[in-house]
């Protein structure tokens, strides 16, 4: 009988794809993040990046306004990354100049969602890679449903806190990470210097990929939520674990189910993103420039 031990000696894992399999419990996800950061440094010619941005639904065009793209890397060339699973997302990452500061932003055109079933490690791999690449700040954006009727589709909202309804954590083992002020008050103040009309709200992460029922939206409201979505919370927790300062910004692309009489559609989400691209792009560029 072949035991795992003899098999390991018989066939040492030299294949990097196998060694970087995040779904294998024996893989160290931080090791994969370091390998990914090394590939990014090599492909972009930048020894380090300073700020990372995750572009969620509706934020794709906004990302183009952040600065000059100096290099583009396909996700599939970087250990641990998958291809974009959502229509309207870009399956590549970019190294972008931040004005003429010499600083660089690492801009992710897509993310892995928890509902894809690739596990929480895959969901937070971009965040861990950003930290391994040298970033000290991460701007995490998303498209979401709004619970406040005054937030018309196309309204960006700063995330002040979250409620994680996935019942999962990216942290493995007895590592009790503090999440007080997870969404940096300092960075929220910087964002409001750029645009003093920005509201704040509590983001509620559901698993998805279905949208909520009207009853679930009412529940989110009772719990203290203002925004409902399918991302961000798990990524922000991982960011805090890695010592990154987090700015979370939601783009309300639709009224949450039951808030408006209209049914929800992904096309509506993309349209709201196109309509808000200018405002959101300027916001990202200005915040990253001042951060
Ligand atoms: I864009 O209304 C977008 N993503 N859960 N609910 C949830 N996720 C979303 C929604 C929404 N809109």
Image (tube, rainbow, N blue to C red):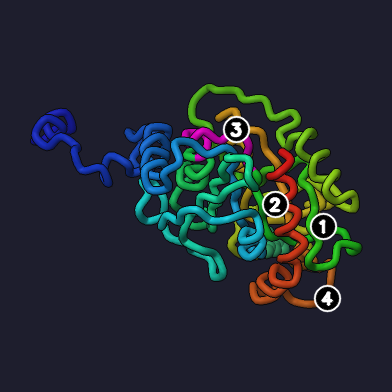
Mark 4 is surrounded, within 10 Å at the Cα level, by few (under 14), some (14 to 19) or many (20 or more) other residues, namely: few
Image quarter where ligand 1 lies: bottom right
- Kindly identify which residue carries mark 2: 285
Residue bearing mark 1: 218
Name the secondary structure under disc 3. loop
Q: Nearer the viewer, mark 4 or mark 1?
A: 4
Is residue 26 in the magenta section?
Answer: no
Q: Where does residue 11 sit, x and y in percent of width and height?
A: 12, 37
Instruction: Please indicate, yes or no, whether residue 187 appears anywhere in the rendered image.
Output: yes
| Residue receiving disc 4 | 261
Q: How many tags in the picture?
A: 4
- Which quarter of the figure is the C terminus placed in? top right
Q: Which residue is drawn at 58% across and 44% down?
A: 52
Secondary structure of residue under mark 2: helix
For the record, the magenta segment spans 130-138
> Which badge, 3 or 1, is on the more N-terminal residue?
3
């Amino acid at each position: 009988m072949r035991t795992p031990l003899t098999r390991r000696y018989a066939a040492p894992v030299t294949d990097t794809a196998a060694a970087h399999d995040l779904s294998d419990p024996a893989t160290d996800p931080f090791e994969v993040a370091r390998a990914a950061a090394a590939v990014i440094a090599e492909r972009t010619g930048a020894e380090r990046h300073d700020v990372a941005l995750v572009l969620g639904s509706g934020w794709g065009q906004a990302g183009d306004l952040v600065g000059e793209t100096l290099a583009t890397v396909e996700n599939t060339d970087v250990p641990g990354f998958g291809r974009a699973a959502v229509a309207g997302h870009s399956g590549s990452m970019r190294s972008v100049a931040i004005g003429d500061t010499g600083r660089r932003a690492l801009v992710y055109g897509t993310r892995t969602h928890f509902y894809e079933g690739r596990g929480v490690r895959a969901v937070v791999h971009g965040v861990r890679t950003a930290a391994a690449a040298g970033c000290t700040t991460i701007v995490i954006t998303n498209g979401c449903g709004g619970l406040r009727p005054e937030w018309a589709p196309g309204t960006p909202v700063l995330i002040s806190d979250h409620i994680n309804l996935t019942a999962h954590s990216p942290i493995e083992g007895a590592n009790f990470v503090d999440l007080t002020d997870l969404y940096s008050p300092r960075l929220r103040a910087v964002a409001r210097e750029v645009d003093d009309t920005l509201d704040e709200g509590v983001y509620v992460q559901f698993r998805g990929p279905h949208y909520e029922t009207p009853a679930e939206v009412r529940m989110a409201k009772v719990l203290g939520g203002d925004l409902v979505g399918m991302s961000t919370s798990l990524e922000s927790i991982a960011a805090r674990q890695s010592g990154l300062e987090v700015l979370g910004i939601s783009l309300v692309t639709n009224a949450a189910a039951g808030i408006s009489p209209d049914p929800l559609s992904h096309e509506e989400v993309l349209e709201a993103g196109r309509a808000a691209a200018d405002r959101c792009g300027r916001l990202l560029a200005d915040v990253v420039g001042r951060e």
